[in-house]
Amino acid sequence: MDHKLEARFLGVLMLCLTFDWTISLDNGLALTPPMGWLSWERYRCNIDCVNDPDNCISEKLYMKMADLLVSEGYKDKGYIYVNIDDCWMEKQRDSNGSLVADRQRFPHGIKWLADYVHAKGLKLGIYEDMGTYTCGGYPGSEFYLQQDAQTFALWGIDSVKLDGCYGDIGDFAYGYPAMSNFMNRTGRPMLFSCSWPAYIVFNGQIPDYKTIADYCNIWRNYRDIEDSWDSVSDIIRFYGNDTGNFSMVAGPGNFNDPDMLILGDYSLSYDQQKVQMAMWAIMASPLFISSDLGNIQPETKALLLNDNIIRINQDPLGIQGRRIMKNGDIEIWTRTLINKGMAFAFLNMNYGGGPSKVTVTISSLGLNAPFGYNIVEGFSGQSVGTFKPQDNFSATVDPSGVWLGIASVSP
C-alpha cells in the first residue's frame, strides 16, 4: 500500500473509530426549503477582478447581492441566504492548516463579510469539498473536516455546501456523516448542503437517500444546472423518474436540491422561466437564485417574488410533489399541501407545435373531498371555479410551458 492510500485508509479508519454514527444532523434548520442567492451558475469561477471587477468572485460581489436581496424585496419574501461557491480561497492553507480567503478578492476576510450580511438580516453560506481539492482546484476538506467546521463556525457561517470533486466515493458514507457531526459539535447551527448522492448517481448506483437525509439538510442528486432549457427539462425528467424514490425522504429539515434557479440569466423564454419556478415549487426545492439581481427584467422579478409560488414551495408539510401521469410530452404533477390542499401542474415538454389541451377528472388528481375544491391559477391567483371529484377539469398548455393550479377544500 503506497503512502497516499495508507493515509486515506487510516483517515477513514479513524473516522469510524471516533464517531457514534447514530448521531444525526440536529440543527433545526431547513424546516421548509431554504431560499436565497448562490453565485455559481451566473458567476462560476471568475477570479479576474482586474479586468472584470463587477463580476468576479469577491467580497464586493456578495455584498452587492446582499444589498439587492434587501433593497429589491427578496429578503421580505424569504430569500435570506447569500451563498459563496467555489474559488473563494487562497490556493494554500496557512501554516496552521486553516483555510484562508483570497487576500486580494476578500481583503476583509470571511468573518467580516458574514458580519456585513448578518447586519442586513441575511445569512452567509460557504463552499468546500469532500476531496483533496475543490472542483476549481482549491484546497479541499479531506483530512481537515473538523478544523474546517470549526473555522466556519468561528467565521459566523450559516450554511456549508460540501462538494465531492477529487474524492473517493467509497469514503463518502463516512466523510459526510463525519462533517455533519463536526458541524453539530461546533454549537453553531449551519445548514448542511451535501453533494454526496450526485456522485453516487454519476457512478451508476442508487444512493441510500434515507441515510443521506439523516446527515444532510439538502442534497444535490443530479448534475449541475446550466443556462439552458435542455438542462432544466433534463432535471425535471430526472425528478419525474424518481429513481430510488428520493421524493419519499423529503420533509421538514431534509430536501432534494435540483440546483439553482436560472431565471434572469440568458436562455429561458418567459414560459420556460414559469416552468422552472412552478416545478421547483412543486418539487419542494431550495430556491437559490443565480443571476445578477441588479440586472433583471420586471417580469422575471415578479415570478421570483410571486406569493402563490412561494407559498407552494414553503408549504409547512414539506411533501415533495411527484409526477403522477406521463402521456408523451404531457406530464401531470401533484403536491399535497396543508389543510388537505393540493398544487398541481400540467407540464408540456414539447419543444414546438401549438398548445395542448389537457383534461382530467378532479378525482384523478387525488382530490376526493365530496364538497369539492376551489381552484385558482397558480401564478395569477385568479379563481377558475369550484369542482367536485367527478367533474372534468381542462387547461391549455403552451409548448415548454406549464399550467399551475392550487386546489383548496370548498367550505
Image (cartoon, rainbow, N blue to C red):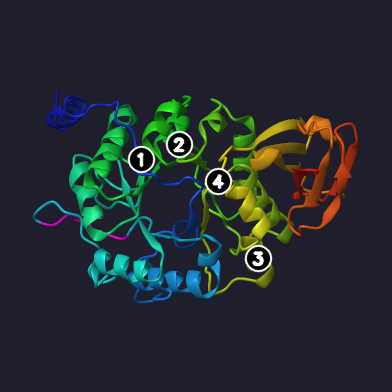
Work out whether mark 1 precedes mark 4 in sequence or the reverse, and give the earlier one. Answer: 1
Question: What residue do we see at 32% from left, 36% from top?
Answer: 176
Name the secondary structure under disc 2. Answer: helix
Q: CA distance from mark 3 to mark 1?
A: 32 Å
Question: What residue do we see at 21% from left, 53% from top?
Answer: 151
Give the number of the disc on residue 198: 2
State the residue position of label 4.
285
Instruction: Note whether residue 256 is visible.
Output: yes
Q: Residue furthest right?
A: 391
State the residue position of label 1.
164
Q: CA distance from mark 1 to mark 4?
A: 21 Å
- Disc 3 marks which amino acid? Thr
Pick the front one: 376 or 132: 376
Answer few, some or many: residues within 10 Å of disc 1's Cα (few below 14, many 20 plus, some between 14 and 19).
Answer: many
Residue 383 sits above or below residue 317 on the image: below
Residue range corresponding to the magenta coloring? 88-94
Give the number of the disc on residue 40: none
Q: CA distance from mark 1 to mark 2?
A: 9 Å
Query: In the rendered image, which quarter is residue 349 located in?
Result: top right
Residue 165 sits above or below residue 169 on the image: below
Work out whether mark 3 precedes mark 4 in sequence or the reverse, and give the earlier one. Answer: 4
Instruction: Note whether residue 357 is visible.
Output: no
Residue 117: x, y in percent? 36, 68
Work out whether mark 2 precedes mark 3 in sequence or the reverse, and give the earlier one. Answer: 2
State the residue position of label 3.
300
User: What secondary structure is the magenta-colored segment mainly?
Assistant: loop
Question: What residue do we see at 45% from left, 46% from top?
Answer: 30
- Disc 2 marks which amino acid? Ala
